[in-house]
Image (cartoon, rainbow, N blue to C red):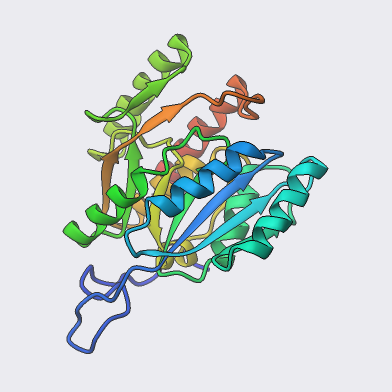
Amino acid sequence: MGQASSRLSPATKVAGDPMGEPGPIRLSVIIAVYSETDSLVETIRRVEAADEGFLHEIILTISPRSSEECLQLCERLDAENPRLRSHIQQRTPGVGWAQREAMELATGTHVIGLLSADLETEPEAIPRMVRKLRETGCDAVTGNRWLPGGGFVGYDRLKLVLNWIFQKSFSLLYSTRIGDLSYGYKLLSKEICESIEWEGTLHEIFIETTVKPLKAGYHFEQVPTVWTARSVGTSKNTFWRNFRYVSMALRVWWRG
């Protein structure tokens, strides 16, 4: 697949009637799973509660290193919920592979990637993203924790300062008003998912899914959202892995 295939206009990017009116949004929501149980059930419940008629499917992309309890839970949820699909991650390790595999599997017109099964991401932001998509005719909508109405709960203070510096620096470098480039929680058209050659294998996929579409000329919008630190378990995104965000952003910018 090429880095930037031919673009669809905002009026026709969702299959619709012959007059070019956009068709209905059918949303594929990707949830990354790594041994979560109770928080996974709550995440799914809140995703479905937030549905305003756009939810097409929920894809659980599951690490094969997950606990047996988690794997059994996902199997049961798959059997009980007709809109839910379970997928055991084939290429490991890394959340980047998880998202890339799920984007390939998605059958909706648009994809939410990536929602966390640990409730760090806010399911209630999904309808805000869909409304922004409908209002603007954009190609993608990203969550922005720095906008009024967004925020951070339980975020390390030093990381918060470094995050702010990073966002300001790279927004300037990319000449964009998008203010949370490294946040992985976003809505993408299926065309974006299919037309761009993705490289990220770990958490750098989060910034890659913003900066590559931006460089390819896709229209991005943003909505406020709140990030909340997980209450159980530990994050797999270590401090040193943050440099992978920087490396990815610089490589994409340099390639043009």
Please report the residue visible at 33 percent of the width from the left and 25 percent of the height from the top. 151
Q: Where does residue 45 sit, x and y in percent of width and height?
A: 50, 48
Q: Nearer the viewer, residue 117 or 215?
A: 117
Relative to 129, 207 lies left or right: right
Q: Where does residue 171 sit, x and y in percent of width and height?
A: 30, 33
Q: Nearer the viewer, residue 8 or 185?
A: 185
Residue occupying the far front of the picture? 80
Tell me which corner region of the image, top left, top right, bottom left or bottom right, holds residue 23: bottom left
Please report the residue visible at 32 percent of the width from the left and 59 percent of the height from the top. 52
Residue occupying the far right of the picture? 68
Residue 251 visible, this angle: no
Please report the residue visible at 42 percent of the width from the left and 43 percent of the height from the top. 123
Tell me which corner region of the image, top left, top right, bottom left or bottom right, holds residue 167: top left
Relative to 174, 42 lies left or right: right
Q: Where does residue 82 sit, x and y in percent of width and height?
A: 58, 68
Relative to 44, 146 lies left or right: left
Q: Where does residue 238 sit, x and y in percent of width and height?
A: 62, 23
Q: Nearer the viewer, residue 164 or 65?
A: 65
Residue 27 visible, this angle: yes
Residue occupying the far bottom of the picture? 18
Relative to 95, 168 lies left or right: left
Q: Is residue 18 above or below residue 153?
A: below
Q: Nearer the viewer, residue 184 or 165?
A: 184
Q: Is residue 141 above or below residue 228?
A: below
